[in-house]
Image (cartoon, rainbow, N blue to C red):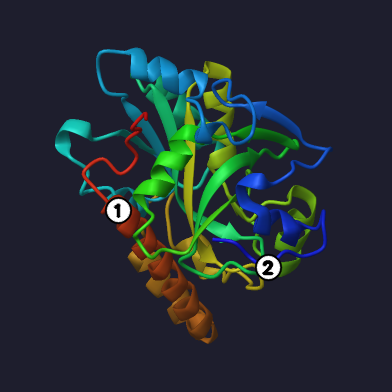
Amino acid sequence: MVEVPHAAGSPEAVVAQGEDTVIAAQHETVPAGSITARGAAAHALSEPAARLDATSRPARLGVVMGLQVEAECLRGCAASAAPLTWISGGSGLRAREGAEQLRAQGADALVSFGLAVGLAPVLRPGDVVIAEGVVTPGGRTIATDAAWRAALLRRLGSSELNLRVARIAGSDEALTSAGAKRRAFQTTFAAALDTESHAVAEVAAAAGLPLLVVRAVAEPAETLRPAIAFAATGDDGRTRSLAMVGHLVARPWEIPAAWRFSKNGRQALEALRRIAAVGPQPFAYAPR
């Protein structure tokens, strides 16, 4: 989980330091659910997690994802603990709407779960980022729940997944070029980026709910996203197989790039399935 440190203050150093990351001065750190100091997971529950522990029933989780294939990774969850779910289709606006809907339906805590684009060059397809904070498009950093995050990391300790604790950036639009990813990395010091986490984090922060962000890298920083990626899914987050076939028939020279894109995505989805397979309640919070 720890990379060889680079120069202090560089994006590489931030990714390497994980939970000991120093938030850059230009980012305003705002706790989701009133998280206090860094490292609170080692000695205390966060305030919202403590409120959940005080209730007489298990926490009801709300999970926001971009794609139907991500939601299918959670099929193994116990029926008695099945989370409320929302599929945004990769839209930040719909992710925000979904997080609000889940909160209105009784969610006590929010999870952003799914695929992400790598920003840190060290990340490979299938690597998993457990976010310590989410950097919004406006530069605000919203912390995740430290105790909840630590509980998940303990649960995944024997999974053999390549786990990273680092920032995740949110964007209303997908980044398609290596140059755009590099600029986002240098600006946000985030290891990865997706189009849902910032919206979920802002809803969690406004409502005082615990927040957890779990993302598997499906696209490394140096790659150019192929055009077929935009034809692959609809607004409902479902795979559009016929549209993909039609696209490749019309543009057969994109087949190698499409194959690589699909292979990377399969590796990331396998990582998500392995996370969900650690138990009937993979995101359960177990206070010590």
Q: Say whether residue 128 is left or right of residue 278.
A: right
Name the residue at the front extreme. 43
Q: Count residues near mark 1 (Cα–Cα under 10 Å), then give few for <14, some for 14-19, many for 20+.
A: many
Mark 2 — residue?
4
Give the alpha-carbon distance from disc 1 to disc 2, as whole Å. 32 Å
Image location (x, y in percent) of residue 22:
74, 43
Give the image quarter of residue 259: bottom left
Up-down: is 96 above or below 172?
above
Residue kind at label 1, given as amino acid type: Cys
Question: Which of the two discs, 1 and 2, labels the residue nearer the N terminus?
Answer: 2
Above or below — where is 35 with respect to 141?
A: above
Kindly identify which residue carries mark 1: 73
Q: Which of the numbered marks, if any, corresponds to residue 132?
A: none
Q: Nearer the viewer, mark 1 or mark 2?
A: 2
- How many numbered marks appear? 2
Q: Secondary structure at mark 1?
A: loop
Pinpoint residue 286: horizontal percent, then vertical percent.
Answer: 33, 32
Q: Residue at x 47, y 33 (%)?
A: 147
Compare residues 253 and 33 and report the one nearer the observer. 33
Type of the residue with mark 2: Val
Q: Is residue 234 above or below residue 161?
A: above
Quadrant where the C terminus is found in the figure: top left
* Residue 42 in view, yes or no: yes
Q: Residue at x 53, y 80 (%)?
A: 257
Where residue 282 sits in the image (x, y, percent)? 30, 44
56 lies above or below 154: above
